Every structure is written in structure tokens, then in C-alpha cells.
Amino acid sequence: MERYSGQNSAYEEGGAIPVGAHPLLPEVTLPADWACMARVHEVAQGITLTCWSGNPASDLEVSAKGPPMFCIGVLLEGRARMSLDGGPVLELRPGMAVVQTAARPASGRFAMRGGQSSRMVDIRFSHDGLQRAGGRPLVALQGRFLHDCSLTDAQWLMGGFPAPAALLRVASDILTCEFADETVRKLYLQAKALEALAIVLQTVGPAAPSASHAREKVRLLQARRLLDERFGEDWTIVRLAREVGLGEKKLQAGFRAMAGRSVHEHLREVRLAAAAALLADGVSVTEVAAATGFGSLSHFSKVFRAERGVLPSQWRDARPI
């Protein structure tokens, strides 16, 4: 494992990069095959691009605390999961973009699987850099996110959406930039960072929601809280729709738009996460299956193995003593 905090335009092998070496990037500990595929470009005061392109063999799972900033991420290849501490998980698939902004240091988790081609671009603006570029720190997160995983009380905002074709093209242009002259390269990448910002603000900029839309969003959030907090209960679409006062079709369509997955998929993931935690605490497989709402032990074992790669009993037995 190597320390990496984006001090230079390319990863330097051997030794730790000092804490706080870059004001816009968190310091994290990365597997060597991930660290060596990262390239950081300081294109202007308050604007930094990080490019990731390669085929790492190992899985990546990091926890980090980042500085206040505004970030645009675009995933071209691979699959990723990310979350703010205390917030829901954002599932990223190829062709998706994510926007984050924080008024104060924010902490969270990021994970990607190895053994596959991974290509992504991370464009970061300091708040001063964003204002110089013509944007406002919170504007892009007050609009039309499909997958909103923000923690607004903490002023940590994060949301995902399908990247428009223009944004995918910009990300690809950044990754394939071949200008050898440093000045020319910086000018080109700065222009691409600003183009990406313009596209994002146009795509998810603020829209005045109707009163009915606002009420619907409140009810969808209530539905997600019920599943997150009472996952052991027998939830059906009919029951959940009745509990929150939405029609079944509106619940299903709205929930998928908000969470990026169906009601059933979200409940299954919440249950599996709770099951994994209980098993790690040494609770028996039978008790865990009952506590997390699975109808039968065999079904629980089948689903857990499909999602986590091992049987529940193996997960439990592998816990540290």
C-alpha cells in the first residue's frame, strides 16, 4: 500500500507523500496498482484534474476526509460505490457523473472492484476557484439530481446523474490529452474543466419545483427512511405506498429516480449490509436471517453469497477474534 495525495502530476513510487500536500485532494492509502494509474494535473489556481486509467488487479476501498471543494466526477469504465459518512450509498455505473460540494471538510467512503478496466476523471474546484470560473458553490446540487445522496444538515451535498454525451466527450478528451508542452497542456485541460462545469450547471442547475413535486419528494424520502430503519419488516410496494401516501406507480418510479435502484433492490442492500454487520458481531446465521427480514434461511444464504461472495457462515467465521 502507498500513500497518495496528488502532490505531483504523476504518482511517485516509494515513500509517503506528506499530509496536506494538496489543498483539494484528501490523503488516502491506495494499493500500488491503483496509485500508479492516477495522474494529477494542476491546471489553474483552484482547479485540479485527476485522471484514472488502467486495469488494476486489486479491489479498492478507501475512507477519507476531504477539504471543502466542488467536484465533478465522470465514470467512463468500471463500477463504483461511494457514500458520505452517515448517508446512503451512490451506485455509479459507466456513463454516470457525480457532483459533490462541501462547505466544510467532509468524510466518506469510495470503492471499486479490480480485475476490470477503470477509467474516470475527477475535476475539483476550490470555492474561490469556482467563483472565479463563474459558478456558485451549491448551485449544481439544488436542482434535478436523479440519485441524491446528500446530507444537507451537514452541508455535505452529493448526487449522481446520467452524464450527457457532451460531458462524456469532455472526460474522454481529458483522459486522452497528449500535449507534451506543459503550458499548452494546462490551457487545454483548464478549458476542458470549464466546459465540464458549464455542462453540469446546464444539466442539473436549479429548477423551481412545484408544490406537488416537493411533497412527492418528502414522501419518497420518508419511504427510504422506513426501509433503512425498519428493514426487518415485511415491506411490499402496496404497504409502503400506503404508509407514505403515494400511488404505487409514483412510488416505484420516484424511488428509482431518487435512489438509483428499485424499492426491492434498495431494501435488499440495506438488509444485506445489516446482516453483514450482525454476522461480524458473531450473531448466528439463523438469527440474522430472521432479524433482517429474509423469509427463509436458504434464501438468505443464496442472496448473501451472490452479493458478498461467501456464505453467511463463512462471513461470520472470518470475523476478527
Image (tube, rainbow, N blue to C red):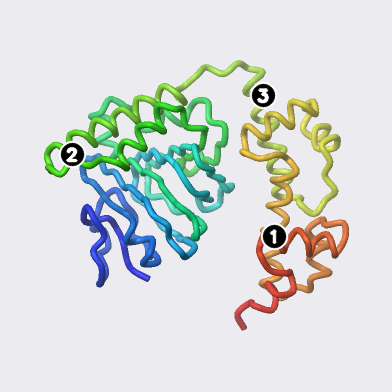
Q: Which residue is the site of mark 1?
A: 274
- Circle 3 Cα neighbour tier, 10 Å, few/some/many (<14 / 14–19 / ≥20): few
Q: In this view, does 228 lie to the left or right of 208?
A: right
Is disc 2 in contact with disc 1, using a CB cutoff of under 8 Å? no
Q: Which residue is drawn at 67% across and 24% down?
A: 215
Amino acid at dot 3:
Arg
Nearest to N terminus: mark 2 or mark 1: 2
Q: Element under label 2?
A: helix
Q: Residue 66 carries which label?
A: none
Is disc 2 in contact with disc 3, using a CB cutoff of under 8 Å? no
Residue 175 seen anywhere in this rendered image of the structure: yes
Amino acid at dot 1:
Ala
Between the residue at mark 3 and the residue at mark 1, the CA separation in whole angstroms equals 30 Å
Nearest to N terminus: mark 2 or mark 3: 2
- Circle 1 Cα neighbour tier, 10 Å, few/some/many (<14 / 14–19 / ≥20): some
Q: Which residue lies furthest to the bottom in this view?
A: 321
Q: Residue at x 41, y 58 (%)?
A: 64
Nearer-the-camera pick, 52 or 282: 52
Q: Which of marks 3 and 1 is in front?
A: 1
Q: Which residue is the site of mark 2?
A: 186
Q: In this view, does 134 lie above or below 230?
A: above
Q: In this view, does 172 lie to the left or right of 214?
A: left
Q: Element under label 3?
A: helix
Coordinates of residue 262 in the picture (x, y in percent): 70, 39
Q: Nearer the viewer, mark 2 or mark 1?
A: 2
Residue 111 seen anywhere in this rendered image of the structure: no
